[in-house]
Image (cartoon, coloured by chain):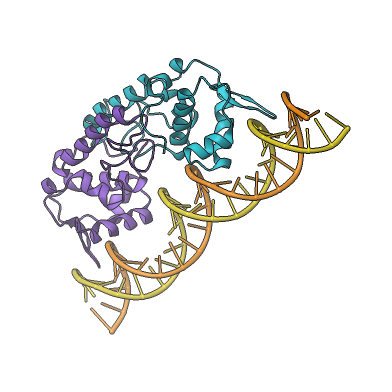
Chain colours: A purple, B cyan, C orange, D yellow
Amino acid sequence: MQLSNSSQYAIRILAYMADKKDSKLLNATELAKTLYIPYKFLTKIMTELVKSGLVISIRGRDGGYKFEKKTSEIMVSDILAIFNDSIKNEQCVLGIGFCNGLCKCALHDQWVEPRHLLQKMFQESSLEDIAGKGCKI
Amino acid sequence: MQLSNSSQYAIRILAYMADKKDSKLLNATELAKTLYIPYKFLTKIMTELVKSGLVISIRGRDGGYKFEKKTSEIMVSDILAIFNDSIKNEQCVLGIGFCNGLCKCALHDQWVEPRHLLQKMFQESSLEDIAGKGCKI
DNA sequence: ACATAATACTACTTAAAGGTAGAATTAATT
DNA sequence: AATTAATTCTACCTTTAAGTAGTATTATGT
């Protein structure tokens, strides 16, 4: 019952970047060291974030990453979507095919509220909101 | 963001068994067919449940499984514990080492309430409560 | 032009979850 | 005693997530 490592890392990276958004560019080496994320894995994740249009990359010497969009416009749920970690309404806690009003799983009724709260949490938290909150590690 | 297959299967199996608890014994073949769970994987899971003391197995002809404890005394959280799927208080949504009051992750404050609701859901749902609710598949 | 320092790409390796196969064991019925 | 139908054990296979390695590409500064 947890997010994938990629999602966790991505949120931590972007929250850190949001905190430091005054600085022009942040490069992979610095991010990896600061956040204790394996360098090669981090660059893989960053490339995903670039392809998804959340951040821009500048290659070559003095290059690095910066946001493409405003941090107030990037929600945590947007990040989860990139790594197929979204919590969908149809998602059944017991993994049965169709879990809705007609045919619902044994835990369906209990699951509705926590799921909704999770969705709300991810959909309503922007990077601006969470920037610089708490520790990095 | 979901339970392991083993946990999902185990809950579905036990909820079904709780529903049919009038019948003396339920065997793996019937459970696998009814619940559309791969037979061999189901027996593997059942053996875990036996070892954990939730159910008793009777070997040999006319054998099968039945509950060791009352279904009102088995909570969903007990099942999750068997498959290392419990939601713990220390569990950080962003996977950082120590996420508490002193050093907390960027999403810590938002995570507290959903996590608590999830824990509550699992800790307060007994097999008796969820027996026979909804569909099986 | 060249050296340097950065990202991007391709491919591979490792670890864990998910699932399968087959033989061994057990117990009831005949 | 033999047959049958059930669980259990050991070992393996498959798939996916996680992580690594090496090279190619790009752009800056000298």
Count of numbered circles in the view: 0
* Quarter holding residue A127: top left
- Classify A76 as above or below B98: below
In x, y percent, where is residue B26? 56, 28
Q: Quadrant of residue C7?
A: bottom left
The location of residue A96, given as percent across then percent down, is 38, 40
Q: Nearer the viewer, residue C1 or D12?
A: D12
Q: At 13% across and 54% down in the image, what residue appears?
A: A69
Q: Looking at the picture, does residue A54 appear above or below residue B126?
A: below
Vertical arrangement, residue B135 with respect to residue A39, above or below: above
The residue at the point 36 percent across, 45 percent down is: A5
Residue B135: x and y in percent read 38, 34
**Does residue A90 appear left or right of residue B13 in this picture?**
left
Nearest the camera: B41 or A125? B41
Residue depicted at x 32% and y 33%: B92
Residue at position x 37%, y 54% in the image: A41
Where residue A19 appears, as percent x and y from the top left, is 17, 44
- The answer to whether residue B102 is left or right of residue A25 is right
Report whether residue B25 is seen: yes
